[in-house]
């Protein structure tokens, strides 16, 4: 997109100034901002700003077009050009419902991995109290880890601690989630603005060292010809299948929803090592074809010899699990 490094950073000061206005300081500058975050471009250009940052319509258009994280959006209404930040607001009058798309029940299963990036010096507090939206309107999550190619925004590049949360578990316990135009998932937390630690799936640092992992209470065991489901109340559900039945996978997840198991429990899928490759190809093909209704249940899995000491809780050891979990 850019011919050289100078071009890429040519408007870095103007971009930071725009972000300051659009996300945090519009009202301090006396600007009118609507509940969706829109501000008239002319009003920004005509500001007498103490930072002496020069902005023109052409510069703003170039910033919006070339921003690598897709932070901004332009719109024309009745010949008037407006601009907004697509997420990251701390201005309380900007509403998540107006500025973002709310995730509905049929959409949350499309996000198998959402991650909040933070730092070691924040982790000690976070692990006691949970994630806090702080002065922003919502907690921000990337739709993967920072090196994933589909992650454009959602965390800073220098984060060294990564908190993956259980989106499904949180959603079914009443937490609302939204997604921005640049694919950042946002959650306002509870009434105090927190997402408690109980909704963390796992936490690791930039070197892959595990700092925290959840205790699983429901185990979905995938075999070649059957699926067994154990829960911590010693309930056992058995399903026959031929390893190619999408209908059976959808049926099992409907049972999870009807019995509210996903509202109360952490779920892990494990399988024998010798069927892993076939399983992955089967799931991938049917997720892409949108035949699997609840893909997150089946994308997030462990095979029978993977990270045993890390992921197996006392519950996994006591339930009747085949493979090597004796």
Image (cartoon, rainbow, N blue to C red):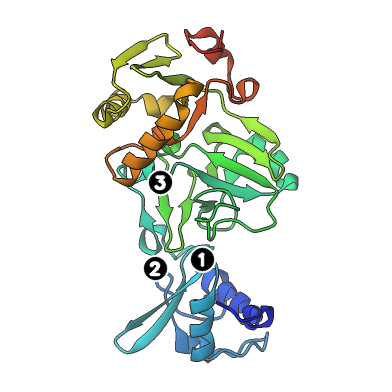
Residue that mark 3 sits on = 176
- Kindly identify the residue that appears in the image at 40 percent across and 46 percent down: 176
Q: Which element carries disc 2, helix, strand or loop?
A: loop
Quarter where residue 50 is shown: bottom right
Q: Is 247 placed above or below 287 here?
A: above
Residue for point 51% across, 66% down: 91
Q: Residues within 10 Å of mark 3 (few under 14, many from 20)?
A: some
Which of the two residues, 271 or 24, is positioned nearer the viewer here? 271
Can you tell which of label 3 and label 1 is closer to the viewer?
Answer: 3
Q: Which mark is residue 91?
A: 1
How crowded pointer 1 is (Cα within 10 Å; few <14, some 14-19, many 20+) is rated as: many
Identify the mark at residue 319; answer none if there is no mark. none
Q: Is residue 7 left or right of residue 255?
A: right
Front position among marks 1 and 2 = 2
Q: Is residue 95 left or right of residue 128?
A: left
Q: Nearer the viewer, residue 53 or 182?
A: 182
Number of marks present in the image shown: 3
In primary-sequence order, the first of circles 3 and 2 is: 2
Q: Which residue is mark 2?
A: 36
Element marked by disc 1: loop
- In the image, residue 26 above or below residue 197: below
Q: Is residue 213 above or below residue 151?
A: above
Q: Earlier in the sequence, mark 1 or mark 2?
A: 2
Residue 274 at x, y percent in the picture: 48, 22
For this view, does 136 lie left or right of residue 212?
A: left
Residue beneath the point at 58% across and 13% down: 314
Coordinates of residue 301 in the picture (x, y in percent): 48, 30
Q: Pointers 3 and 2 in contact (CB under 8 A)? A: no
Mark 1 and mark 2: span between their CA atoms? 11 Å
Helix, strand or loop at label 3? It is loop
């Amino acid at each position: 997109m850019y011919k050289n490094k100078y071009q890429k950073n040519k408007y870095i000061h103007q971009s930071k100034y725009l972000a300051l206005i659009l996300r945090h300081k519009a009202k301090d500058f006396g600007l009118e901002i609507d509940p969706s975050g829109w501000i008239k471009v002319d009003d920004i250009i005509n500001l007498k700003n103490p930072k002496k940052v020069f902005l023109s319509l052409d510069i703003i258009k170039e910033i919006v077009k070339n921003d690598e994280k897709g932070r901004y959006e332009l719109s024309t209404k009745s010949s008037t050009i407006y601009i907004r930040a697509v997420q990251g607001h701390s201005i309380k009058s900007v509403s998540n419902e107006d500025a973002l798309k709310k995730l509905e029940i049929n959409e949350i299963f499309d996000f198998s991995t959402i991650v909040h990036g933070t730092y070691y010096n924040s982790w000690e507090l976070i692990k006691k109290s949970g994630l806090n939206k702080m002065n922003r309107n919502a907690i921000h999550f990337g739709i993967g880890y920072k090196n994933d190619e589909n992650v454009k925004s959602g965390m800073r590049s220098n984060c060294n601690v990564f908190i993956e949360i259980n989106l499904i578990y949180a959603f079914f316990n009443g937490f609302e989630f939204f997604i921005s135009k640049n694919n950042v998932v946002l959650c306002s937390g509870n009434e105090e603005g927190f997402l408690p630690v109980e909704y963390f799936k796992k936490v690791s640092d930039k070197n892959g060292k595990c700092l925290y992992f959840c205790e699983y209470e429901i185990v979905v065991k995938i075999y070649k010809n059957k699926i067994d489901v154990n829960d911590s109340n010693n309930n056992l559900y058995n399903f026959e299948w031929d390893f190619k039945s999408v209908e059976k996978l959808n049926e099992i997840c409907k049972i999870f929803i009807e019995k509210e198991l996903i509202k109360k429990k952490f779920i892990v899928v494990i399988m024998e090592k010798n069927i892993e490759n076939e399983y992955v190809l089967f799931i991938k093909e049917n997720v892409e074809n949108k035949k699997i209704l609840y893909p997150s249940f089946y994308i997030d899995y462990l095979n029978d010899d993977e990270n045993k000491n890390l992921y197996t809780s006392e519950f996994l050891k006591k339930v009747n699990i085949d493979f090597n979990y004796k």
